[in-house]
Amino acid sequence: MRSKLLLVTIAGITAVACSSGEPAHLEPGATVVDLGSAPTLSASPLTTTSVAKDAVVLVDPSARAAHVVRVEPFQIERTLPLDHTHATGGILVGPDVRYIVGLSGSDIVVHGAHATRVNPVVLPGQRIASVAFDADAGLLALADEFESLALLQLSADGDVEGAWLGGPLLGDDGALGAGGFIGGGRLVSGLSGGRLAVIDVRGSIAAQTWTYRVLNVPNLDRANFIARIPDAERLALVGGTSRLFVLDTDTGAVVSEMAIADAGSRSWSTLGRPHVTVPTTDEAQPLRVIYPDATGKFVEKKLKSRAGAEKAGGVALEQSHLDQARGILTLVAKDRAGKVETRYVARYRLTDSLLLDVSELPRIGDVALAPDHYVVRFPSQLGALERRKYGRIPDLDRLENFNLPRIAR
């Protein structure tokens, strides 16, 4: 049986967005670096940015470093070297940026507060195809193109406390599929036949074998997306091919269920509150966003895209962030009108689907979203960042030439 392991960053300061046709996921932040999809795996893109309170973390390949950038006041707080990782894969950021995990090819490099560990567990493949990270619990799961699975347990400072390398087969229960951390050290993964495996990650590392239990979910064909609901640790959002579920992962009970059209371009995101964005055939409101509330009930909103996009090839999402507390959905997207492609950031008020503001973005460059501003990193050996306030004509501040000390060495 072939596995489709899709591991999604759910907790801590990271979370992920996706815009590919296959169900895929990532961490909070911005432009993704897609590590490539393996034949039997749904690849999980990794971001080159992450968001932590009022700071963002951006990988700068020119400087082979990660910059921790304070949004207010706008300044580079510190720079962390990524010499071992070549800064080509992606990053996972621990609580309060006390450590960074750099990924490149099949290499795993833990830049801890006290030491750097290179490949604390060795994957036999050539590239990391998908990843899941629970920053609060310090748990990390990674899969290569051969479906080998590496589990890591990290301290708050990034010290490696345990590791194990396992295969995708759970005995007679079949192979692991799409999955995500849901809190309490648990990784939930899809199995065949509408079943889910609830894996005790710490227990599996300690026993050096899979420790898990199985839940049966009626009407679930195949799990493509699994995410923790932030204010209800027992509840998880599970996305199938044609239906959405809110599931009690302790009892297996279905709290809510909703049919969803099988749209290949749907985008799953764990940035902010987990949600799915789906294109519609409604030219007036071509985007649907669906998310669970605190009780597990589904909320659905229809949104209007930029004028003309729905008639000219649609909207391609790079990332989407749902801030339920403020009632705002923020999208980084591209749309096409004829041969002209426009990249932009847009914000919607969820109570009435009002488009609050939209502003164009440079065609290239990483984007990290913060509550009141967003930060753009431009490709530059010397270093170039802009902080922009949301709005049609954004106020901006710029930092430049901050890579000079590293280049001069």
Image (cartoon, rainbow, N blue to C red):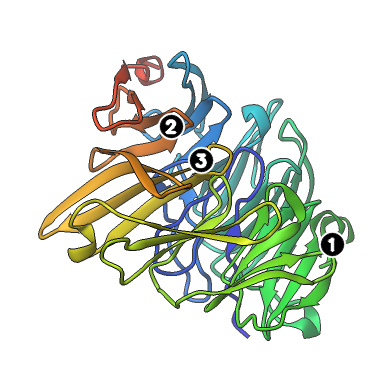
* Residue 153 circle label: none
Q: Is residue 98 visible?
A: no
Seen in the picture, residue 80 relative to 296 is either above or below; the reply is above
Q: Is residue 256 visible?
A: yes
Task: Please state if 378 lies on the left or on the right of 268 as rendered.
Answer: left
User: Alpha-carbon distance for marks 2 and 3?
Assistant: 8 Å
Assign a secondary structure to mark 3: loop
Q: Amino acid at mark 2?
A: Arg
Quadrant including the N terminus: bottom right
Q: Residue at x 58, y 39 (%)?
A: 325
Seen in the picture, residue 86 relative to 304 is either above or below; the reply is above
User: Alpha-carbon distance for marks 3 and 1?
Assistant: 27 Å
Q: Earlier in the sequence, mark 2 or mark 3?
A: 2
Task: Please state if 255 lies on the left or on the right of 355 as rendered.
Answer: right
Seen in the picture, residue 95 relative to 353 is either above or below; the reply is above
Assign a secondary structure to mark 1: loop
Residue on which the image places disc 1: 208
Q: Quadrant of residue 109?
A: top right
Residue 261 percent location from the top left of the image = 45, 76
Assign a secondary structure to mark 2: loop
Seen in the picture, residue 87 relative to 402 is either above or below; the reply is below
Residue on which the image places disc 2: 64
* Residue 85 circle label: 3
